[in-house]
C-alpha cells in the first residue's frame, strides 16, 4: 500500500479540467499560493506572536495567503489552533495518517477519543489541504482503504465488504518494534452500529484531495477505484426499497447514539448525494466502472427529485401538510406517505418564517421528523442537492432563527431538543443526550466549517463571520470543547472533551475559507443542470 502511495505522483490535471466549480470564475482564478509557500502560518511560533504589542500584530500574523490580498489579519487563535492540530497528529511507521479525536489532558477518561475517526478527520484533512500539506491526507486515504479490506464481524455476522471504519487506532508493539492498525467498524462502538457516513466522507475527501492537489493518480489507482465501488455497492444494490433514499439504523453517523434518526435521516441522504456526485467525477468508465456510473446517474436523478420534493419544508409546504387529507390510495395521492397533520409539532408553526425553509430531518411512511439538522442542511447546500432557491431559503431561515440555531455558540446540531416523555421514548432515556445537550440540541463548534462553506457557496460570508466572531470569543478560552449545552449554547458541554480536534480544525477551515473563498471548490459541487428541479414551488417565498 505504501508503494501505491509513492506511485501516486506525476500526472496532474489542471483544475479547470476537473468537474465543477461553482464560484464565479474571477474568484477562482486568483493565484493560489500553496505548495510554493516557504513557511506556513502555523510554523510561526507563539513567541513570535507575543513579541508584538497588539494581540493581532499585523506583520507577524500576515499569512502567505493573506499576502495575496494584503488585508487579512489572522486572529492569534489561529496559531494556537495549528499547534493543537499538529499535536493531535497520529503516525504509522513514521508517516502521518490522521489526527486523534481529542487530546484532552484534563481527564483520564479517554474512552475512544484516542482514535482517528474518519468523520472527525475530514476538517483536519481540509485544513491540511488548504495549507498545502496533502501527504497526511493521502496516507489517511490509503490506510483506511487498506482497513476496508479487512474482515469485519459483529459476533457471527459478517459486515459488507465496502464498510469503512468509524475509527482506527495505531497500536505499537514494543517487542517487535512495529506499528499496526486496529479498526472499529461498529463492532466495538456504543450501540454496535456501522458508520454509514464514513464511506461517504472517504469519497468526498478523495475528491477534495484530488481537487486541491490536481493529482489524479491517487483516485485513478485500481485500489481507489475499487474502494469507491465497494462503498457504492452497499448503497446501490437492488432490494425492497420504494424510495431512492438510503434506509439506515439509528446512530450511524455523527449522531452515533439513539436519537430517533433511523429511517431516512437527512445527514445520510445529503452525504449520500454528495458522495455519489463526487464518485461520478472520479470513476473511470471501464469495465464495472461503466455500470456503476449508470447506476449512480439514475440514483442521483431519483434522489434529488425525492429530496427536493418530499424533504423540503417552507411556509407554503407546511401549510399544505397542515391541510393534508389522509388515507389516500393510488397514484393520485397528494399525501403520498400518509403523514398525519396531527403529528406536526406545535413548535414548527412558530419556527417557520414566511421567508425561508429547510430540509426536514426524516421522511418515511406516516413519518415526518420536523427537526432541523445542521449538517444535512449545510451539506445539501455544498453538494447542490438544494436548488439555488432552496439554498437561499436555508440561509434565510438561519438568519431569521439565529437565536435558536446559533445563539451564543455555533452551531446547534439539531433543533429543537427532545424533552420529557419524548426524550424517554426516543433516546431510550440516554443520560448523555438530555435536553439541549450533546446530540440533543447541543451546540457543536465543528459545524462552523460546514456553515462557513454554505455561507460562501450562497454568497453570504457575513453570516459566517458573525459565527466566527462568536467562536473566537470563547473557544480558545474554554480549551476547544467538543460541544456546548443549553438553549443558547452558553455552557461547556456536560461531558464535553477539551481540545477536541475537530473543533480546532473546523475553526481553521472556516477561517481559511473566509480568507480565500476559492478553497470552496474542494468541498462544493455546482448545480447539475441535468437535474434541474421539476417543480418550481420549492422557493421559500410564499405565493400568497
Ligand atoms: C462522538 C460523536 C461522533 C464523533 C466522536 C469522536 O461519539 O458523536 O460524531 O465522531 O465523538 O469525536
Image (cartoon, grey):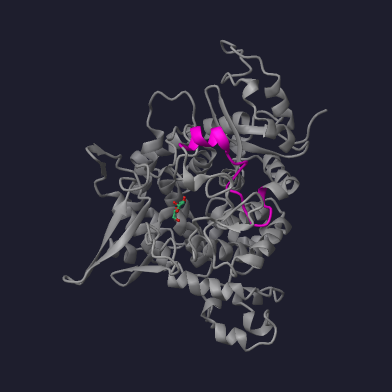
User: Is 418 included in the stretch rendered in magenta?
Assistant: yes
Whether residue 261 is visible to the viewer of this picture, yes or no, is no
Is 232 or 152 nearer to us in this picture? 152
Q: Residue at (72%, 74%) from the top-left corner?
A: 71
Q: Is residue 349 left or right of residue 513?
A: right
Compared to residue 221, the image places residue 348 above or below, namely above
Q: Position of residue 199 (x, y in %)?
A: 40, 47
Is 427 or 224 nearer to us in this picture? 427
Query: Which image quarter holds the C terminus?
Result: top right
Q: Is residue 270 left or right of residue 53?
A: left
Q: Position of residue 208 (x, y in %)?
A: 49, 57
* Range drawn in magenta: 405-428
Q: Quadrant of residue 3?
A: bottom left
Q: Is residue 432 left or right of residue 540?
A: left
Name the outermost residue toward the left.
175
- The total of numbered circles placed on residues is 0
Q: Position of residue 151 (x, y in %)?
A: 24, 46
Q: Is residue 391 left or right of residue 10?
A: right
Q: Quadrant of residue 410?
A: bottom right
Compared to residue 193, the image places residue 177 above or below, namely below
Name the outermost residue toward the bottom.
51
Compared to residue 52, the image places residue 42 above or below, namely above
Q: Quadrant of residue 26?
A: bottom right
Q: Position of residue 482 (x, y in %)?
A: 52, 58
Compared to residue 405, the image places residue 483 above or below, namely below
Whether residue 449 is visible to the viewer of this picture, yes or no, is yes
Query: Which image quarter holds the N terminus?
Result: bottom left
Is 61 or 32 nearer to us in this picture? 61
Amino acid at each position: 500500500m505504501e508503494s501505491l502511495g509513492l506511485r501516486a505522483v506525476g500526472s496532474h490535471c489542471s483544475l479547470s479540467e476537473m468537474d465543477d466549480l461553482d464560484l464565479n470564475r474571477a474568484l477562482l482564478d486568483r493565484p493560489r499560493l500553496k505548495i510554493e509557500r516557504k513557511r506556513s502560518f502555523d510554523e510561526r511560533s507563539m513567541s513570535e506572536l507575543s513579541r508584538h504589542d497588539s494581540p493581532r500584530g499585523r506583520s507577524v500574523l500576515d499569512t502567505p495567503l493573506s499576502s495575496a490580498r494584503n488585508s487579512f489579519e489572522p486572529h492569534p487563535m489561529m496559531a494556537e489552533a495549528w499547534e493543537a492540530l499538529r499535536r493531535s497528529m497520529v503516525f504509522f511507521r513514521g508517516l502521518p495518517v490522521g489526527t486523534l479525536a481529542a487530546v484532552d489532558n484534563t481527564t483520564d477518561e479517554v474512552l475512544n477519543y484516542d482514535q482517528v475517526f474518519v468523520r472527525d478527520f475530514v476538517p483536519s484533512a481540509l485544513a491540511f489541504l488548504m495549507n498545502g500539506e496533502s501527504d497526511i491526507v493521502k496516507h489517511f486515504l490509503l490506510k483506511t482503504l487498506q482497513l476496508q479490506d479487512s474482515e469485519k464481524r459483529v459476533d457471527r455476522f459478517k459486515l459488507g465488504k465496502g464498510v469503512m471504519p468509524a475509527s482506527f487506532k495505531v497500536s505499537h508493539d514494543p517487542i517487535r518494534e512495529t506499528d499496526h492498525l486496529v479498526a472499529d467498524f461498529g463492532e466495538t462502538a456504543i450501540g454496535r452500529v456501522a458508520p454509514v457516513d464514513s464511506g461517504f466522507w472517504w469519497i468526498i475527501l478523495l475528491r477534495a484531495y484530488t481537487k486541491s492537489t490536481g493529482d489524479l493518480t491517487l483516485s485513478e489507482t485500481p485500489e481507489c477505484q475499487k474502494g469507491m465501488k465497494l462503498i457504492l455497492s452497499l448503497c446501490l444494490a437492488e432490494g425492497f426499497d420504494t424510495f431512492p433514499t438510503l434506509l439506515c439504523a439509528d446512530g450511524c453517523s455523527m449522531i452515533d447514539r439513539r436519537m430517533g434518526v433511523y429511517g431516512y435521516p437527512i445527514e445520510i441522504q445529503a452525504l449520500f448525494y454528495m458522495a455519489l456526485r463526487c464518485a461520478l467525477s472520479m470513476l473511470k468508465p471501464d469495465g464495472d466502472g461503466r455500470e456503476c456510473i449508470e447506476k449512480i446517474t439514475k440514483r442521483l436523478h431519483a434522489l434529488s427529485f425525492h429530496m427536493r420534493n418530499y424533504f423540503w419544508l417552507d411556509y407554503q409546504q407546511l401549510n399544505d401538510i397542515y391541510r393534508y387529507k389522509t388515507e389516500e390510495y393510488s397514484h393520485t395521492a397528494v399525501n403520498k406517505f400518509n403523514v398525519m397533520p396531527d403529528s406536526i409539532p406545535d413548535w414548527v408553526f412558530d419556527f417557520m418564517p414566511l421567508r425561508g425553509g429547510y430540509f426536514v430531518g426524516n421522511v418515511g411512511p406516516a413519518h415526518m421528523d420536523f427537526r432541523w439538522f445542521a449538517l444535512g442542511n449545510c451539506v445539501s447546500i455544498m453538494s447542490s442537492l438544494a436548488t439555488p432557491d432552496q439554498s437561499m431559503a436555508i440561509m434565510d431561515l438561519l438568519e431569521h432563527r439565529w437565536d435558536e440555531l446559533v445563539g451564543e455558540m455555533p452551531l446547534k446540531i439539531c433543533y429543537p431538543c427532545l424533552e420529557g416523555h419524548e426524550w424517554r421514548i426516543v433516546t431510550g432515556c440516554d443520560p448523555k443526550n438530555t435536553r439541549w445537550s450533546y446530540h440533543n440540541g447541543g451546540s457543536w463548534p465543528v459545524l462552523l466549517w460546514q456553515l462557513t462553506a454554505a455561507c460562501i457557496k450562497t454568497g453570504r460570508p457575513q453570516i459566517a463571520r458573525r459565527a466566527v466572531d462568536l467562536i473566537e470569543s470563547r473557544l480558545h478560552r474554554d480549551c476547544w470543547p467538543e460541544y456546548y449545552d443549553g438553549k443558547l449554547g452558553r455552557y461547556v458541554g456536560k461531558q464535553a472533551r477539551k481540545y477536541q480536534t475537530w473543533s480546532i480544525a473546523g475553526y481553521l477551515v472556516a477561517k481559511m475559507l473566509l480568507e480565500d473563498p476559492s478553497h470552496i471548490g474542494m468541498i462544493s459541487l455546482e448545480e447539475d443542470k441535468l437535474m434541474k428541479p421539476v417543480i418550481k414551488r420549492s422557493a421559500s417565498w410564499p405565493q400568497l
